[in-house]
Amino acid sequence: MSSASSQGADPAEIAKFEQLAHRFWDPDGEFRPLHHLNPVRAEFIASRIRPVGATILDVGCGGGLLAEALARKGARVTGIDLAPAMIETARLHAAESALDIRYRVQDAAVLADSPEPRFDAVCCMEMLEHVPDPAQFIAVLARLVKPGGDVFVSTLNRNIRSFLLAIVGAEYLLRLLPRGTHEYERFIRPAELAAHARAAGLALKATGGLHYEPFSGRSRLTQDLSVNYIAHFTAAKATA
């Protein structure tokens, strides 16, 4: 997760991830939870589309965790982010891994306004809780996908349990994440996410809880959406 739209980006958020870019691929570093969650996220996506040959856009791609996982499943992946150091990290790691992934420093809203072809699927992981206007950003995601295409979003629920686990536990007690990574007021309830998506012309198809066990490092998909969760939306098909 990083940032991919200047319209919704906080410069402080971009700077925060810029400073950590060199540690992105350290499985024991600040991004350790993402390394553990990533296989579950990638499998959720791959089980709902046919990844082989599909054009997929990873919005706020950071150092390329999800992009690489989807590329290994046969997708043609483009990753965009506003943090140049993250994009450079992603490019270098993809080259070392012999993966053909198109990375660029790109504003998602500018890309949505461009004449470039739309994508079969658009992904945005752990980013919406870092933008000031999630509804506007979801509308941007909807404009980036082809008619009938798929949009995948993961974020954090807003309730006392998520506050205790994602902020108090992860940032202050276990120190899995740097302090200040999250702001509770920016967490998004599933009903709010679904409403924003409907307003953008997207239909909810499936949800799943992303359960992470910090001591074992194990992650799994559940039906519990109370903390981390992922959602699958589809865009309306083109009318004749």
Image: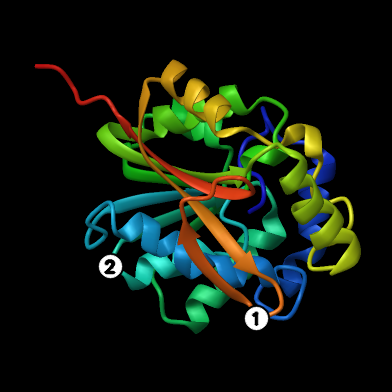
Whether residue 102 appears in this view of the structure is no
Other residues around mark 1 within 10 Å, as few (<14) / some (14–19) / many (≥20): few
State which quarter of the image contains the N terminus: bottom right
Judging depth in this view, the residue of 197 and 138 nearest the camera is 197
In this rendering, is residue 44 above or below 238?
below
Amino acid type, mark 1: Ser
Picture coordinates of residue 36, whole percent (x, y):
58, 72
Whether residue 205 appears in this view of the structure is yes
Q: Is 131 left or right of 70, judged from the image as shown?
A: right
Residue 74 - label: 2
Q: Is 15 left or right of 64, judged from the image as shown?
A: right
**Could you say which quadrant of the image residue 178 lies in?**
bottom right
Question: Residue placed at 32% from the left, 42% from the top?
Answer: 119
Tell me the SS state at disc 2.
loop
- Residue assigned mark 1: 216
Q: Residue furthest left?
A: 240
In this rendering, is residue 234 above or below 76?
above
